[in-house]
Amino acid sequence: MKISFIGAGNVAFHLAQALQDAGNQIITVYSRKLQNATYLAEKLENVKAQDHLDFSTNEAELFIVALADNALPEVLPKLRLPQATILVHTSGSLPLVILENIQAIGINKGVFYPLQTFSKFKAMDFAEIPFCIEAEDLETEAILFDLAQSLSQKVSRVTSQQRRILHLAAVFACNFANHLWVIAQEILSKEKLSLDLLKPVIRETVEKALTTNPLDAQTGPARRKDTAVIETHLAMLEETVIRQEIYNLITQDIIYSNKIDLQKLNELNH
Amino acid sequence: MKISFIGAGNVAFHLAQALQDAGNQIITVYSRKLQNATYLAEKLENVKAQDHLDFSTNEAELFIVALADNALPEVLPKLRLPQATILVHTSGSLPLVILENIQAIGINKGVFYPLQTFSKFKAMDFAEIPFCIEAEDLETEAILFDLAQSLSQKVSRVTSQQRRILHLAAVFACNFANHLWVIAQEILSKEKLSLDLLKPVIRETVEKALTTNPLDAQTGPARRKDTAVIETHLAMLEETVIRQEIYNLITQDIIYSNKIDLQKLNELNH
């Protein structure tokens, strides 16, 4: 397939290379800054870099918008596409309908969302990355599905509403979990201790949660309803009121979640 | 070294085998339930199982208490030890002084804390497990330090106060992170989506945070101060008030942490 990229950030960087490796031909890479487009284009074979949004004579069959979410409302109205091509975005948090105002005839629209966080200099194994596919019509969906399957073993149809839920869940599972490690690091730094001490147990906690089930894998004072330890911890957090409240609320929610679980078990047993 | 274990749970199970593999001789394993002590004893070589706490004629030089934290206040007063031996516990959350009421002459006391979460049927690479050592006297500290170094490359002296801080940090970094995956799983289940979709991005988030720095690795709507997305997410959580408040507080704390970070950067640059 002939493909052009609107965007030259981390997603475009990894996705363009993976698509080229899978036998597709990348035609053009756009970035607002020409040097960013050129940087990616030079990593690929015979690819043109451009810093304007007029693709009306571009020979690609598929245009992939891989930009920061907040850049789309500005970029999309300026985009000029040839007729009868496919336009997709790669965003986890934006609906398919964000593409509706494109001014061109016979554009088939979809979402081609690789559910992974990309770093510029770290190669990713695309075979393990879940791809979430959505399209306005079945033919486009089939084309996007085949393309994703040429990269990954884990391709699903995911609606805009499901992707909204996925994004909310990912904020808890990734951004907020990451912030708990920021908090842990700050707590440790007050006693001149390094987060290195906790890294093995963090990694093992993740593996236990993801290979069994996070609800079953839970341990610690909240799970045991060990009120003496919980009270001590709350007192230790008195100087950081937000964190004391985060401790308090997550502890309550762990206790509550396990009650619910117990009820489910009881229902199953009776 | 000749070692007896008070406790036959997950920590004792893995630690006893690792210590035996390192050339030590396990003498006795105690559990309140004889069958649990026997189960572990039979995995080891020539080890006696017992369900009473009279060790006064036991030939071990080191007694390792590896019990649930809440069992210690009940078990320790009943413990009968021979004279001039070493007694340690393996707890991350209990101070050294919890051992002070042991009734025996010339007992040297310490803490021998492997900072890891153990599962019964999963082998652990002890070389990578941080050991936290504390003792009442330097001679005992040296003995415990050598013993830990025969198992692990990562042995540190850690005071009771530091261990208290480590435990609080571990509750955030492990128990609370695990609970965020429980929340993510529940959010997904409402749209019949599986946590499997998020597992690759969770694993990559952990690796990015732990190989770089969690504060620098942060992404997402709170990090970008994307108030439109934050408002949408809060509205989506209206039916679960505690989780709405958890979202709100962690978001505030991410924004706050990055301001602090910005201040630090400004200080460095001026």
Image (spheres, coloured by chain):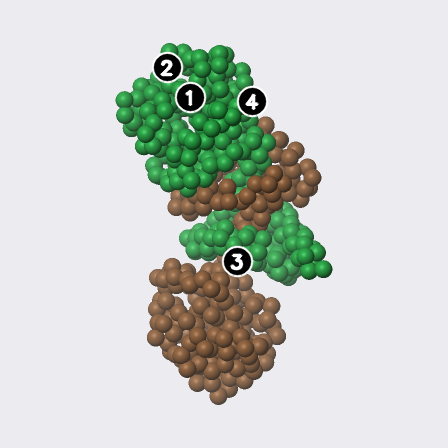
Chain colours: A brown, B green
Position in image of residue B59 (x %, y %) = 36, 16
Q: Secondary structure at mark 1?
A: strand
B223 relative position to A210: left or right: right
Which residue is drawn at the image coordinates 43% and 66% (left, top)? Answer: A133
Subunit bearing disc 4? B
At x 68% / y 41%, what residue is drawn? Answer: A241
Q: Which mark is residue B63?
A: 1
Q: Nearer the viewer, residue B58 or A247?
A: B58
For the residues beneath circles 3 and 4, the answer to whether they share a chain is no
Does residue A105 appear anywhere in the picture?
no
- Kindly identify the amino acid type of the residue bearing the numbered disc 1: Phe
Element at badge 4?
Answer: helix
- What residue is disc 4 on? B97
Instruction: Report the residue marked by disc 2.
Output: B58
- Both on one chain, marks 3 and 2? no
| Type of amino acid at the residue the image marks with label 2 | Asn
Pinpoint the chain carrying mark 2.
B
Report the residue at 48% width, 62% height from top: A118
Dot 4, crowdedness within 10 Å: few (<14), some or many (≥20)?
Answer: few
- Front residue of B221/B39: it is B39
C-alpha span from label 1 to label 3 = 50 Å
Callout 1 crowding tier (Cα within 10 Å): few <14, some 14–19, many ≥20: many
Residue A204 against residue B191 in the figure, above or below: above
Of residues B152 and B219, the one nearer the viewer is: B152
Q: Which residue lies under the disc numbered 3? A: A167
- Callout 3 crowding tier (Cα within 10 Å): few <14, some 14–19, many ≥20: many
Q: CA distance from mark 3 to mark 4?
A: 47 Å
Residues marked 1 and 2 touching at CB (< 8 Å)? yes
